[in-house]
Amino acid sequence: MEEREDCIALQCRQYSASCREFSVRCQPVQLRSLSAATCSVWLAAYWLFVLTQNSMVLSAAIFITLIGLIVYLHFVKIDQESLLVIASLGIQMTSSYASGKENTTFIEMSRVKDVVINEAIYMQKVIYYLCILLRDPLDPQSVSEVVPLFQQRPRTMESELPFPKGGCFRARVQAHCWVSVMKTAVL
């Protein structure tokens, strides 16, 4: 099953009755936007060079642009996130960045207390996101940590008003569907 909304594609695979994988793939890096940003920084640096006649301005602009690009591709731009749920074993979360770097985290099923939809207020928006609540090892009735899933969101969900209007309500219904699918896979 695959759904597309804005620049994000959701893919659900069921390998067996107790093993499912959920993948969210974001649009790849656009060469046009990176080129435009690089050219604008370099044109501004060249303009400063013409005014000051200092070649360090050009060198600094090139250096800062390259470092910024490497940091963006290696730490910020996530291409794909996947969640592999094996009911008897645990949950493996993998984030793949544009540079090829991958972060993988494994959570044992015995540590999972529940799967919930959290709400966060950001500026004038309410953002809904899926979370796993982890049990506290000392007190099994309390929660020790909240682990957010799928850091990439469609732009349409980010830009909704805080009150339930059409799209926001639809995003909430989709999130509830996610929770029910996750709970059947996890619990």
Image (cartoon, rainbow, N blue to C red):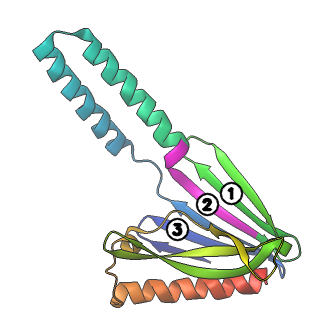
Specify the label residue 94 is tagged with. 1
Residue 99 at x, y percent in the picture: 56, 40
For marks 2 and 1 on the same chain, the one whose residue lies earlier in the sequence: 2
Question: Which quadrant of the figure has residue 163?
Answer: bottom left
Q: Nearer the viewer, residue 162 or 168?
A: 162
Query: What segment carries the magenta color?
Result: 75-84
Callout 3: helix, strand or loop? Answer: strand
Q: How many marks?
A: 3
Residue 35 among magenta residues: no
As drawn, 17 above or below 137: below
Mark 1 to mark 3 CA distance (whole Å): 16 Å
Mark 2 to mark 1 CA distance (whole Å): 6 Å
Callout 1: helix, strand or loop? Answer: strand
* Image quarter of the C terminus: bottom right
Q: Amino acid at mark 1?
A: Thr
Q: Amino acid at mark 3?
A: Ala
Q: Residue beneath label 3, please?
A: 9
**Residue at position x 74%, y 79% in the image:** 142
Q: Amino acid at mark 2?
A: Glu
Asked if the residues shown at circle 2 and circle 3 are in contact, with their CB atoms under 8 angstroms apart, the answer is no
In the image, farthest residue toward the left: 51
